[in-house]
Image (cartoon, helix red, strand yellow):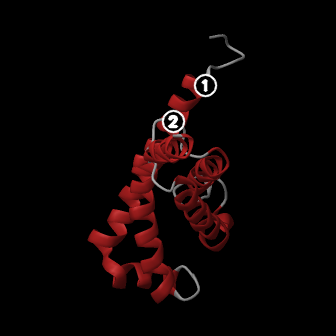
Amino acid sequence: MTLLRSTPSQADLGLAILRIAAGLVFAAHGGQKLFVYGFDGVAGAFGQMGVPLPGLVGPAVALLEFFGGFALIFGVLTRLAALGLAADMLGALFLVHLGAGFFLPAGYEFVLVLGSAAIALVITGAGRYSVDSVIASRGTSVRTS
């Protein structure tokens, strides 16, 4: 290992850490929307924030964040889940947070980091330490046997 280069194992470990951390945050926020606020509460909040079709988008976002977060944690359908979560963060960025500036509590720094993590996972995939990798390696071994 050097400061300028990493091994494939290190890259896979880095992807696992990114995937799990982002997945935990998404799943926690989705869980809060589902189990604390409920569909009606989320739809009402989304409506107050000016999100279009809040009765449809609010519950969809809650489910996406909850189940998509778990998909990232385990590395299942990672690229698909990350694509949905990246779209979620783009919506949050442009519809809710951009006008409030960069910094929290209302700014866009949080959704920028989560969206960037999701986009990175769309590009790279889950890495070796994931269910996706296990499934892919089984498919390869079946075809070559």
> Which residue matches tag 1?
8
Above or below, 14 relative to 82: above
User: Which quarter of the figure has residue 106?
Assistant: bottom right
Tag 1, which secondary structure? helix
Task: Give x and y (percent) for residue 76.
Answer: 45, 53
Cβ–Cβ below 8 Å for labels 1 and 2?
yes
Tag 2, which secondary structure? loop
For mark 2, does the 10 Å Cα neighbourhood hold few (<14), some (14 to 19), or many (20 or more) residues?
Answer: some
Q: Most extreme residue toward the front, as rendered? A: 145
Query: Which residue is painted at 33% across and 64% down in the image?
Result: 31
Instruction: Give the quarter of the figure containing the N terminus.
Output: top right
Q: Three-letter amino acid code at disc 2?
A: Arg
- Disc 1 from disc 2: Cα separation: 9 Å
Dot label at residue 128? 2
Q: Three-letter amino acid code at disc 1?
A: Pro
Query: Which residue is painted at 45% across and 88% down in the image?
Result: 55
Dot label at residue 65? none
Q: From the viewer's perspective, is 76 left or right of 112?
A: left
Q: Most extreme residue toward the right, as rendered? A: 4
Above or below, 68 relative to 9: below
Above or below, 1 relative to 130: above
Task: Give x and y (percent) for residue 64.
Answer: 46, 68
Q: How many marks?
A: 2
